[in-house]
Amino acid sequence: MADQHRGGMGGGGGGYGDLHRGGGETQQRQGAMMTALKAATAATAGGSMLVLSGLILAGTVIALTVATPVLVIFSPVLVPAAIALALMAAGFVTSGGLGVAALSVFSWMYKYLTGKHPPGADQLDHAKARLASKARDIKDAAQHRIDQAQGS
């Protein structure tokens, strides 16, 4: 019985080695099938997108064909209206941006004046000290010239 068992598993025709080699062929077939499946999926997706882009192009051409006479007839009204809308939109965007900038400046000033030391406060203090030093130098130089003029 032990010989029979060994013969059935490791011997001639149907042993473990044969199953292992057959598994490699199965993996190759599965890899080829997977590649074919990927190619079919890509072809289907690409074809669908190509058809959709063609339909969109046709719809765009038809819409332009229908809309062109209407745009030509109404262009004396539409062009100035579009320019006015663009200018109004630019004005609102600019106004909003400048408002946000002003609020941030006021917020920075409030923090600085209340002593919370916002970013850039060191630079401002340094510049203030340099300006005060220059102002003292100019005042001293002016006072010296006045004294010289009065002494002569």
Image (tube, grey):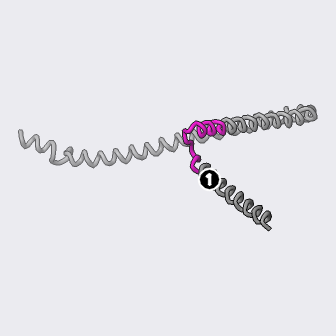
Picture quarter with the C terminus: bottom right
Q: Is residue 151 magenta?
A: no
Residue 130 sits above or below residue 19 on the image: below
Q: Where is residue 23, by image quadrant?
A: top left
The answer to which image quadrant residue 116 occupies is top right
Viewer-proximal residue among 149 and 13: 149
Give the camera-side residue of 139 and 28. 139
Front in this rendered view, residue 31 or 7: 31
Q: Is residue 110 magenta?
A: yes
Residue type at mark 1?
Ala
Q: Residue at x 22, y 48 (%)?
A: 17
The residue depicted at 25 percent of the width and 47 percent of the height is 20
**Residue occupying image coordinates x 71% and y 57%:** 139
Tell me residue 65's x, y (percent): 84, 35
Q: Is residue 129 above or below residue 144?
A: above
Magenta-highlighted stretch: main secondary structure?
A: helix
Q: Can residue 58 be spotted in the picture?
A: no
Camera-side residue of 89 and 79 = 89
Q: Which residues are magenta?
A: 104-122
Q: Position of residue 108 (x, y in %)?
A: 62, 39
Q: Is residue 142 left or right of residue 17?
A: right
Q: Residues within 10 Å of mark 1 (few under 14, many from 20)?
A: few
Residue 24 in picture, x, y percent from top left: 31, 48
Q: Is residue 18 visible?
A: yes
Would you name the residue on which mark 1 appears?
129
Q: Position of residue 150 (x, y in %)?
A: 79, 63
Residue positioned most to the left? 1
Q: Horizontal placement of 40 versus 77: left or right?
A: left
Q: Secondary structure at mark 1?
A: helix
Looking at the rendered image, the quarter that the N terminus falls into is: top left
